[in-house]
Amino acid sequence: MFDKLSTKLLNITIASLCRTKQLEKAEAAIIDGIRLGILPDVVTYNTLITGYCRFVGFDAGYSILHRMKQAGVNPDVVTYNSLMAGANRESSLFQCFDLLEEMLNMEIVPDLWSYNTLMHCFFRSGKPDEAYRVFHKIILQSISPCQTTYNTLINGLCRNGYISNALSLFRNLQSYGYNPEIVTYNILINRLFKSGEFRSAMKLFDELRDSSFVPNAITYTTVMKYCFRRKYFNKGLEFFFEMKSRGYTYDAFAYCTVVGALLKSGRIQDANKCMSDMIKNGYELDVVSYNTFINLYCKEGRLEDAYQLLDTVEKEGLEFDKYTHTILIDGLCKAGNIDGAKRHLNYMKMMGFDCLVALNCFINGLCEVGQIDYALKIFQSMDVKDSFTYSSLIQNLCRARRFHEASKLLLSCIRAGMRILRSDQRAIVNGLNLSGFRNDAAKLAMEIQTANKTYLFGLFDISKEDVSFCELWSARVGSRSYVESIGEELTNGCP
DNA sequence: GTAGGGTTAG
């Protein structure tokens, strides 16, 4: 095949195969090449590493590093950047560090992309101070940050709760002549929605539409999702049709958003039609698309079809995730099959999945069939609980008129720093009142107030981990609050 | 080689 062709052409072939997930064919092409005397070089291996990290996992990518070393090909900065990106995808800060150390030991000098990835990794691990140190290092080494550096900063600041600072950085960059990219807009729109700032997010979306940029598939999917969450179904669907008409529905993402929303609102027939439309388009289905299908089947009461699909797809070698199992456990509970749900839950635990949501579904299912005491037993055995866990039990305890138990749960929930629906709080106080326990009701109302206040104060406590970040900022911005000045400061520090 | 979108429970 590569008779008279060079390694460069081999690399083009490998790149194209790896991009399209055809790793086995890429391996075969390398073997063909070797037979013809064309030896793979560092670029070949780097491409392979990227493909394996992306489609199989970090370990698979890392094993290529050994292979290339054995073949006498020395890794370069791109090799390590690809591996660090792979570690980052699996949220492994330690692996990222190890790789950085390894490359330094080999006297390979990190470049801007190494730092971008490292910064991203720190932000993802909830360490904004360390991430910022990496940004500092970029500036101190007189490396010019690129758009991705700023996008990573903006995204990371938002992710760690500094949205207003990210916004001011964004505005300052604009005034410094850095034109934002569509990605920057997408990051900010998504993060504003995520933090509940619906109007600000929509305002930025309008600004984007008025600018010279055109929203892309990612923008539309994001905006749609949050319209649905706010129950603006028609508005969400309008965006879906708009993106369809622009040819942006080239993958299953938007369909999964729409179907998810339709199923949540009980529009099962519409969801079914939408999935058929998706199938007609012939997109490649991944775990999320299959999960959406399984969810549809469960909501239609077709549990057998759901399990059949699970079986077929698993036999094809695709691995399902915690969503799949949670959807099935919820489906079983809703169908009243508590024993089946329990069995599936045990399987899920055995497989090592995070079972929090599935346990919440199970607790809810148990309450629905009147087994509140069993549900309470499960609750007590749970290491991790969230507001859903408490809420389910509180509502069902109220329904069973067990207000004192509900009140105990409510207080422990608030004290654990979790928010709980006001309607749940009112239900207990009113329940106690109406059952003649007026003193207890008044006492509970007071305790709720105190617990809420304590929680709010708790929010302003700066944890030990943040100290170095605070020190860094107070050193740079004097007496001003470090939180207030991040956006400006970062921009002023830029070349 | 880097950054941004989809699926679960009240």
Image (cartoon, grey):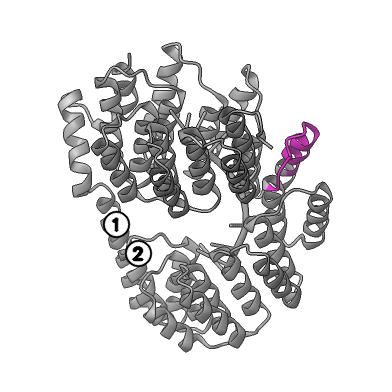
Percent coordinates x, y for residue A83 in the rendering: 41, 43
Along the line of sight, which residue is nearer the eye, A295 or A250? A250
Label 1: chain?
Answer: A
Is tag 2's residue or tag 1's residue first in the polypeptide sequence? Answer: 2
The answer to whether A428 is drawn above or below residue A295 in the figure is: below
Q: Which residue is rendered at x = 18% and y = 39% of the image?
A: A468
What residue did someone put label 1 on? A455
Q: Which residue is rendered at x = 26% and y = 36% of the image?
A: A104
What residue did someone put label 2 on? A414
Label 2: chain?
Answer: A
Q: Quadrant of the C terminus of chain A?
A: top left
Residue A111 falls in image quadrant: top left
Along the line of sight, which residue is nearer the eye, A176 or A81? A81
Residue A425 falls in image quadrant: bottom left
Q: For this view, does A296 lie left or right of residue A408?
A: right
Percent coordinates x, y for residue A257 in the rendering: 67, 50
Q: Which residue is rendered at x = 49% and y = 83% of the image?
A: A401
Percent coordinates x, y for residue A298 in the rendering: 71, 71
Asked whether residue A300 appears in the rendered view, the answer is yes
Q: What is the secondary structure assignment of the residue under circle 1?
A: helix
- Marks 2 and 1 sit apart, C-alpha to C-alpha, by 7 Å
The residue stretch that appears in magenta: A237-252
